[in-house]
Amino acid sequence: MVVASAASRLPAGPARCPSESWRVGYQLLAIPGLITGIVALVGLYRFWPSARWLSIAAWVYMLVWMSVSPGPVLSNAVVGAFSQCSTLLVGMVLALIYFSPAAEWFQKKELTHDG
């Protein structure tokens, strides 16, 4: 009797999962952010003036993309630790390229023609 009453309160049918095409489309939306992030990383290494704004744009794009992720994400402690370290490193890089003397390295320099 107890089992029958408990079973009647369970939802009918399987839980609804997003369709496979929706998941693939969601994953494809990450590609522009990854490409922008890689270009920004190379630009920061080469001290391109526009690389600072590009790195901010890539970071914001990925934050928005992650905030609309479908459902909870499970990870172990090592992945969580690396995620936290990654976030700290991104914050330190952004602080360095905007609020330190290294910000001058990203300024456009005018070419002078000595002659």
Image: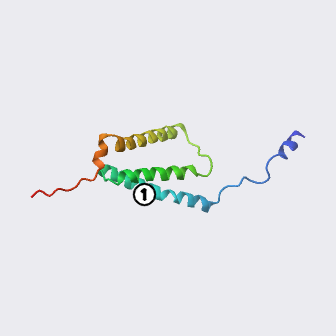
Pick whichever, 44 or 20, lies toward us.
Answer: 44
The kind of residue on which mark 1 rests is Ile
* Number of marks present in the image shown: 1
Residue at the (46%, 55%) spot, across then down? 33
Residue at the limit of the structure toward the right, as seen here: 1
- Residue 68 at x, y percent in the picture: 58, 52
Residue furthest out toward the bottom: 21
Q: Residue at x 52, y 59 (%)?
A: 29
Residue that mark 1 sits on: 35
Q: Nearer the viewer, residue 105 or 26?
A: 105
Residue drawn at x 54%, y 57% is 27
The image's colouring method is: rainbow
Identified at 84% across, 42% down, the residue is: 6
Residue furthest to the left in view is: 115
The picture places residue 11, in percent across and down from the top left corner, at: 79, 50
Quadrant assignment for the C terminus: bottom left
Say whether residue 78 is left or right of residue 105. Answer: right
Q: Residue 31, position in %: x, y?
A: 48, 58
Q: Quadrant of residue 74?
A: top right
Query: Circle 1 — which element?
Result: helix
Relative placement, left or right, of 22 versus 44 is right
Q: Quadrant of the N terminus?
A: top right
Where residue 113 appears, as percent x and y from the top left, is 14, 58
Give whichever of 40, 9 is nearer the camera.
Answer: 40
Which residue is at the front of the view, 44 or 72?
Answer: 44
Direction from residue 28 to residue 115 in the image, left or right: left
